[in-house]
Amino acid sequence: MRIEHVAMYVHNLESAKQFFVTFFQAIPGELYHNPVTGLRTYFLTFEGGARLEIMNRPDMEQAKGLKRTGLIHLAFSVGSTARVDALTEELKEAGYTVLSGPRTTGDGYYESCVLGFEDNQIEITV
């Protein structure tokens, strides 16, 4: 068994898509639009086959806290400590807040955590 994809609501669908394309080399599928519900979605495919569905609809709730229940971050493995460092710096220079790292965690991961688009936490690991 494997997870087929993960989905998340976003406020600005095009900005979210561009974030993942620019920094994580996502390949976006075609825009899907349901004219009845107003739902718009993109499936983004990443190296190795992982997929993320980003979605938007007119009746979404706005508020979300940094420490909340549910999915808390997306983690991307970038292959090396040097790439973790470089991508973290690239995101910082692009105006995103680095929440932690790069560092080696107590459980042995080399990672950083960045507050990405729309305050979603993005973890970058080896």
Image (cartoon, rainbow, N blue to C red):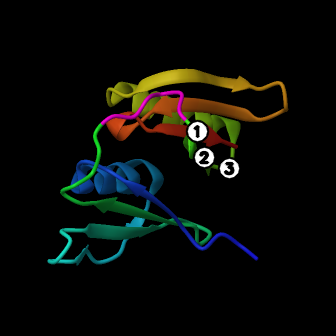
The answer to whether the residues at label 2 and label 3 have Cβ atoms under 8 Å apart is no
* Badge 2 element: strand
Task: Decide which of 31, 89 is in the foreground and name it.
Answer: 31
| Total marks in image | 3
Name above or below for residue 23 compared with residue 3: above
The quadrant holding residue 53 is: bottom left
Give the number of the mark in front: 3 or 1: 1
Q: What is the three-letter code of the residue carrying label 2?
A: Ala
Task: Decide which of 44, 11 is in the foreground and name it.
Answer: 11
Answer whether residue 3 is visible to the viewer in this image.
yes
Task: Decide which of 26, 121 is in the foreground and name it.
Answer: 121
* Dot 2 crowding, Cα within 10 Å, few <14, some 14–19, many 20+: some
Answer whether residue 83 is visible to the viewer in this image.
no
The answer to whether the residues at label 3 and label 1 have Cβ atoms under 8 Å apart is no
Determine which residue is flagged by label 2. Answer: 75
Q: What is the three-letter code of the residue carrying label 1?
A: Glu
Which stretch appears magenta?
63-68
Give the number of the mark in front: 2 or 3: 2
* Dot 1 crowding, Cα within 10 Å, few <14, some 14–19, many 20+: many
Task: Look at 35% across and 39% down and name the residue there.
Answer: 117
Name above or below for residue 59 compared with residue 102: below
Name above or below for residue 22 compared with residue 72: below
Determine which residue is flagged by label 1. Answer: 123
Q: What is the three-letter code of the residue carrying label 3?
A: Gly
The answer to whether the residues at label 2 and label 1 have Cβ atoms under 8 Å apart is yes
Measured as percent of width and height from the top left, residue 5 is found at: 55, 69
